[in-house]
Amino acid sequence: MHESTVSRVTANKYMATPRGIFELKYFFSSSIASADGGEAHSAEAVRHRIKQMIDAESSADVLSDDTIVQRLKDAGIDIARRTIAKYREAMKIPSSVQRRREKQSSKLAD
């Protein structure tokens, strides 16, 4: 079954479990192709990796979406810049320009 069909069918549908109520989409993860033709990577794992990279950045070296794309490609993950931006926005992580401003203003406040 095609990914878009599953997405459409599971939209706005929820499941009550002993651990709470979850949207059905929660149980289906998309995948990101491997840059070297190997196994695909879970979208959730890629999002976690992006978050780790951003959490580890210094105020002097704020990572742009393009830099994140390059680092992930170097690690064998083939992903588009717009996908990085989409994941970052979904995780409520500001753009590199906004993060740089925030880090500089907090540095000045100290």
Image (cartoon, grey):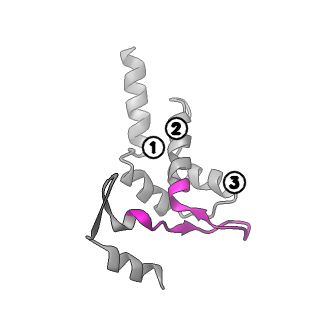
Residue of label 2: 62
Residue type highlighted by circle 2 = Val
Q: Residue at x 36, y 17 (%)?
A: 109
> Is residue 19 placed above or below 96 in the rendered structure?
below
Category of crowding for the residue at label 1, using alpha-carbon neighbours closer than 10 angstroms: few (below 14), some (14–19), many (at least 20): some
Classify residue 79 by image quadrant: bottom right
Relative to 10, 29 lies left or right? right
- Magenta stretch in the rendered image: 26-46
Residues at discs 1 and 2 in contact (Cβ within 8 Å): yes
> Is residue 17 placed above or below 106 in the rendered structure?
below
Residue type highlighted by circle 3 = Ala
- Say whether residue 27 is magenta: yes
The span from disc 1 to disc 2 (Cα, nearest Å) is: 6 Å
The span from disc 3 to disc 1 (Cα, nearest Å) is: 21 Å
Category of crowding for the residue at label 2, using alpha-carbon neighbours closer than 10 angstroms: few (below 14), some (14–19), many (at least 20): many
Q: Which mark is residue 75?
A: 3
Q: Residue at x 58, y 55 (%)?
A: 69
